Image (spheres, rainbow, N blue to C red):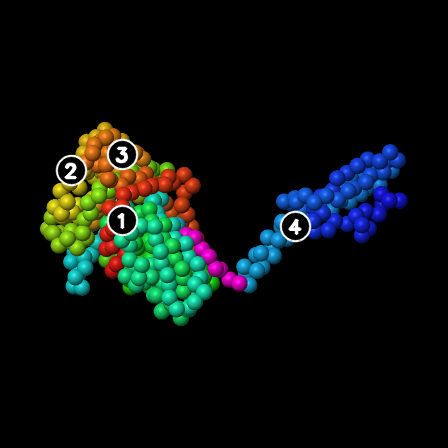
Amino acid sequence: MASSHLLSHHLFPSPLQTSTNRFNLPNGRVFLRPCTRFRKNPSLRIAASGSGRKQVEFVYNLEDKLNKLADEVDKEAGLSRLTLFSPCKINVFLRITGKREDGYHDLASLFHVISLGDTIKFSLSPTKTKDRLSTNVPGVPLDERNLIIKALNLYRKKTGTDNFFWIHLDKKVPTGAGLGGGSSNAATALWAANQFSGCIASEDDLQEWSAEIGSDIPFFFSHGAAYCTGRGEVVEDIPRALPPNLPMVLVKPKEECSTAEVYKRFRLEQTSSTDPSMLLKQITENGISQDVCINDLEPPAFEVLPSLKRLKKRIIAASKGDYQAVFMSGSGSTIVGVGAPDPPAFIYDEDDYKDVFVSDACFLTREENEWYKEPVSQAGVSFSEEDTTDESPYIS
């Protein structure tokens, strides 16, 4: 009768008896000996004894139970740590359409997130008095001048929450590059603060608030591809983002363009006459080409930094048709080549370009109610210390 009493107390598995060894005895009966081996999936097994009776073997899933307990603890305690990807952007085209009474310029631009980005780690501070920011590069302000800290202060002001944070910024996006790295960091900080507070604000709220501290920040609350107007804060998602399998290369020289100096040299009468809505239509219907990737800030940027104009011309000449378009992003000083992931050989071969920043990238979007995720295949990038000392992208 032993084979029919497998649920007796001495055979029922304890939490560490997660599986059993099965032995056939000479009398035809089956003996099940407990052993302490974890199984990832719970199971219920039916085994036949020599007498034809069925036996039930229970396998206790300790790992699953511990995970459930941990989830319950996290649920009660709330979020305490969060790591987020903070991607940058490029301007596929950038038209400056007028001068505003407030001193800013009206623009019309196709912004698109790309796969190059920073990583930001957030942890709740045990004290509710001050945020603490650290980073892997010199020259980035760590106080209230930094857009990350400004974003956290803004969130607390708008919501009345009192969470403060320890933040570490792992910087990969070069500064002074026209890639919106600082604006992306601010948007990521707003998103993180909202997660720690149980998402009490909507994405629309975050987007609207972010315009108070930076014109480019609202764009990052789009799905990753948007037609931006006004100062850049009027964001309209486009129905079709650019394909993520379309590669590009970013080349940024050590020299940087001062945004203020670029706009100081800007002349409205020297801009393109092309209707920006027509540029958007051509790109969404036919893709990227050299004639649609217009940047009205290129002429004044090339005055500020003549070597940047030479770099663009050399990339076009050396590419032999590898790139669908070569253009400057934002106010510079990054030159983008869309269509291939590698720069021309002269970038590696000539001493004049030994300190340039080079990275491949692709177009990136996000799902609603989720933040951007770094593509698994995205290669790490490195750049010289000189490329990390400009503070202006982080200071409004």
Q: Nearer the viewer, mark 4 or mark 1?
A: 1
Is 78 a magenta residue?
A: yes
Q: Amino acid at mark 2?
A: Arg
**Other residues around mark 1 within 10 Å, as few (<14) / some (14–19) / many (≥20):** many
On the image, the x and y values in percent for residue 308 come to 17, 41
Which numbered dot is residue 62? 4
Q: Which residue is mark 1?
A: 388
* Residue 290 appears left or right of 38: left
Q: Nearer the viewer, mark 1 or mark 2?
A: 1
Counting residues from the start of the chain, the first of labels 3 and 1 encountered is: 3
The residue singled out by tag 2 in the image is 310
Q: Secondary structure at mark 3?
A: loop
Label for residue 343? 3
Pick the front one: 394 or 54: 394
Residue sitting at x 64%, y 53%: 65
Q: Give the extent of the magenta segment.
A: 77-84
